[in-house]
Amino acid sequence: MHPTSLMMTTSLMTIFLLLAYPVLTTLSPAPRAADWALTQVKAAVKLAFFVSLLPLFLFMNEGVEAIITSWNWMNTLTFDVNLSLKFDHYSIIFVPIALYVTWSILEFAAWYMHADPFMNRFFKYLLVFLIAMVVLVTANNMFQLFIGWEGVGIMSFLLIGWWYGRADANTAALQAVVYNRVGDIGLILAMAWMATNLNSWEMQQMFVTAKNFDLTLPLLGLIVAATGKSAQFGLHPWLPSAMEGPTPVSALLHSSTMVVAGIFLLIRMSPLIENNPAALTLCLCLGALTTLFTATCALTQNDIKKIVAFSTSSQLGLMMVTIGLNQPQLAFLHICTHAFFKAMLFLCSGSIIHSLNDEQDIRKMGGMHHLTPVTSSCLTIGSLALTGTPFLAGFFSKDPIIEALNTSHLNAWALTLTLLATSFTAVYSLRVVFFVSMGHPRFNTFSPINENNPMVVNPIKRLAVGSIIAGLLITSNVIPLKTPVMSMPPLLKLAALTVTILGLMVALELASLTNKQLKTTPTLAPHHFSNMLGFFPPIIHRFTPKLNLVLGQTIANQLIDQTWLEKAGPKALVSSNIPLITTTSNAQQGMIKTYLALFLLTLTFAALLVSY
Amino acid sequence: MSKIQQTAVNMAGVGFRKWAQALTKSKGTGISALLSGCRAASGGSKGSLPGSYPTTPEEKAAAAKKYNIRVEDYEPYPDKGEGFGDYPKLPDRSQHERDPWYKWDHPDLRRNWGEPMHWDFDMYIRNRVDTSPSPVDWISMCKQLFGFIGFMLFMFYIGEKFPSYQPVAPKQYPYNNLYLEKGGDPEKQPEEVKNYGI
C-alpha cells in the first residue's frame, strides 16, 4: 500500500482510538481519578488534534483523499451496508478544526464546571458527542451518517438538560429533541428513497446512479433534515432555548459542531442538489429568511448567550444561502471559520458570566474591559471576525459568499434579506460589545474579577489566534473547486463592507443615545416582535402541543370507548337491531290486508323473476 | 380430647375468626389484606372514586367535599355523555402561572398535597402548554407572525420573477455564435451576430 495512504489511514484510526479510549475506561467499576477529566479526556483530545494534523498536511501537500471500507456490516445480495469512512477534503479539514475547538473548550470547561459534582460525567458526555460528530463527518454512507446524526442529537439532549432539576432546562432539552426529530423525518424519508431507488447508501454509488432520477423528493427530505438540525426558520426555536445548558455545551454543540451537521449533510449531498433548481431555490430562500429573522430577533435580546445563539442561527442561515448558490465549498469554509470565532464568543461570554456571579443580562454588565481586558479584547476580535472585518477569519468566508450572491442571477429578495442581515450582524455585535465591555460597571462589586487562571485565558487566546488566521490559512492552501467571479462592479464588491459599516454607524448612534435622556422611548410593536422572537415560540409552543394532547386525550378517553361501545359493539347491536325488530313485528300484527299485500308483492316479484 | 389439644383447637378457631373478620373489614389490596388484615393509610378509599354526575345540591356538596373544593367553587363538567361524571371543571390555567417563589409541597409541579388536579393536568405541567398571559394579545401575535411569513413568501415570489444581476445583453458565443454547432448550413455564409464588444 502506498505509504501516504497507509499513513493517512493509520492516523485516522488512531484518532478514533484516542477518542474512544477514555469513554471505554469509564465502563470499569473502579472510580475515576479526581482529575480524570483534565488529564485523560482533554489530553486525549489534544493528542488526537495533533495526530489529525498529519492527514491534514498530507492532504495539503499531496491532495490525498482516502476512502476506507473496513468492515462488511450488513450485506445482502442486493444491498450492502459497510463501515466506510470517507476522508475527503471536507472531513480532513473539519476534523482538526473540531478537535482544536474541542480541546480549547474542554480546558475552559475544566474551570467552568469545577464546582460541579459530576464533572467527569460531563466530560464523558462531551467526548461521546465528539465521537458521534467525527462519525457523522467521516461517514461515507447514509447509515453511518445517521448513526452520527442521532448520536449528536441525543448528546445534545443530555447536555442541554445537564441541570435537570431546572424545569426550563428540561423543556429546552425536550424542544431540541422534538425539533430534531421532525428534521429526522426528512432524513429518513431521503434515506428510504435512496435505498429503494438508488439501491445503495454509499455516497459514490448514489451520486453515479442518481443522474437519471427526479431527485426533488429526497432533496426535500434532506432540506427538512438540515432545517431541523441547523435551526433554519420553522424549526429554529430549539437553538436559543438550548442556551439553558452550560456554556461549554453551547460553545461546542450549538455553535461550532452539532448545528453545522445539517449544512454538512447538504454539502456532502451537493452533487445531488446542484442539478435541481427547485431545491437550490428553496435553500436560498429558506436561508435568507432564517438569516434575517434571527438577526432581527438578536437585536433586542438582553441575555448575552441568547444574542450569540441568534447570531449562530443567522450564520447558519447564511451557510444555507451559500448552499442555495451552489457553492458547497464556500459554505464549508464558513463552517470552519465560524467554528473559531463563535466558540470564542461563547467562551468569552462564559468567562464574563462566571466572573459576574452567573449574571447573564447585558444590562447588568459593563466596563469589563477594565476588569478582564484579554477576555473583552477577544470578545471584540470575535465580533469583528463575525461581522466580516477585512482579513480576519470571517472575511475570507463571508465576503466571497456575499460577492457570489451579488453576482448571481437569482432571487433579488434573498439578496436584500442577506445584506440586511449582514448589517444587523454589525448592530447586535456592537450592542454586545458596548453593553459588556464599554462604559461603567452596572453591577455591584464582587470578589476580585480577574483573568489570572490560565485555564480560562489560554483557550480563549488559542481560539483568538484561530479567528484571526484560520481564514487565511484555509483559503491559501485549498484550491477552490468552482471558479469565483473575479470581476464585478466596485459597488457589488464592497457591498458587504458597506452594509456592515452602515450597520455599525447606526448602532453607534443608537448607543450614544443611551447616555442622553432625550425623552422616554415608547414601546413599539417591532420591539415586541423582535424581543418575543417573532411570536413564533408563543404561538407554536402553545397551540400545537395543546391540539395534539387534547386530541390524544379525547381519542383515548371518549372516541375509542364511544366507538367500541356505541358504534361497533353492544349498543350498535341494539341500535341496528331495533329497526329490524319493529318492522318485523309491525308486519305481523294479524291484519289481513298486510298479509294480502305481502302475498301480492311476492307474486309480483316471482312473476318478474320468471319473465326476466 | 386432652386439655392441650382443646386449647389448640380453640386458638385455631379464634385465629380463624380473626382472619375472617380482617378479610371482610380490611381496606387494603391483595395478599397484604389477606395475611395481615392491616390497611394502608394511602391509596383511594371507595368513597374517593369519581361518581356519576351530581344532580341534587346534596350530591354536589358531597362531591365538592370529596374533591377538596369549596361548594361555591365546585362546577362539574356538563353532562353530555362524555364520561366526566362529577369530576370538577377547574380553570384552564397551566402550572406556569403559579407563583414560582411560594413553597409548594411539590416544587417542580407547583402543587400542594390534596389539591384537586385539573382533568388535563399532564398537559399543563411546566414542560408543556403554557397559558400565562403574553405581553401582546393572541390575535395581534398571530396577525404579525403570519403576516410576516405571508409577506416574505410573497416577496420571494416577486424576487423569483425579478432576479438580481440581470445580464445586459444576450450571450454571445464564439465561432459565429456557434453557427455550425447549432445546425447551420455549412455552405451558406452566416450573418454577423455581435451583441457586445470587448
Image (cartoon, coloured by chain):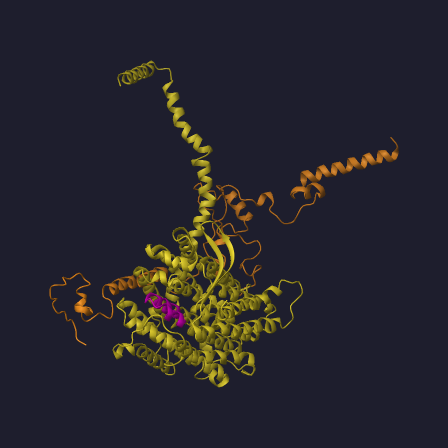
Chain colours: A yellow, B orange
Q: Farthest residue toward the bottom?
A: A370
List x then y, in percent, for residue A39: 61, 74
Q: Is residue A330 magenta?
A: yes
Q: Is residue A387 visible?
A: no
Please identify the residue farthest to the front as the structure is shown. Answer: B187
The percent position of residue A56, horizontal first and vertical second, equals: 47, 73
Residue A217 appears in the picture as rendered? yes
User: Where A357 falls versus A293 (above or below)?
Assistant: below
Question: Which quarter of the image is occupied by the C terminus of chain B?
Answer: bottom left
Magenta part, dominant SS: helix
Of residues A210 and A334, the one nearer the viewer is A210
Percent position of residue A74, x then y: 50, 53
Q: Say if A597 sits above or below A413 in the image.
A: above
- Looking at the image, residue A460 sits to the left or right of residue A396; the answer is right
Quadrant assignment, res B171? bottom left
Q: Quadrant of residue B18?
A: top right
Q: Which residues are magenta?
A: A314-334
**Camera-nearest residue between A344 and A528:** A344
**Looking at the image, residue B44 lies above or below residue A465:** above
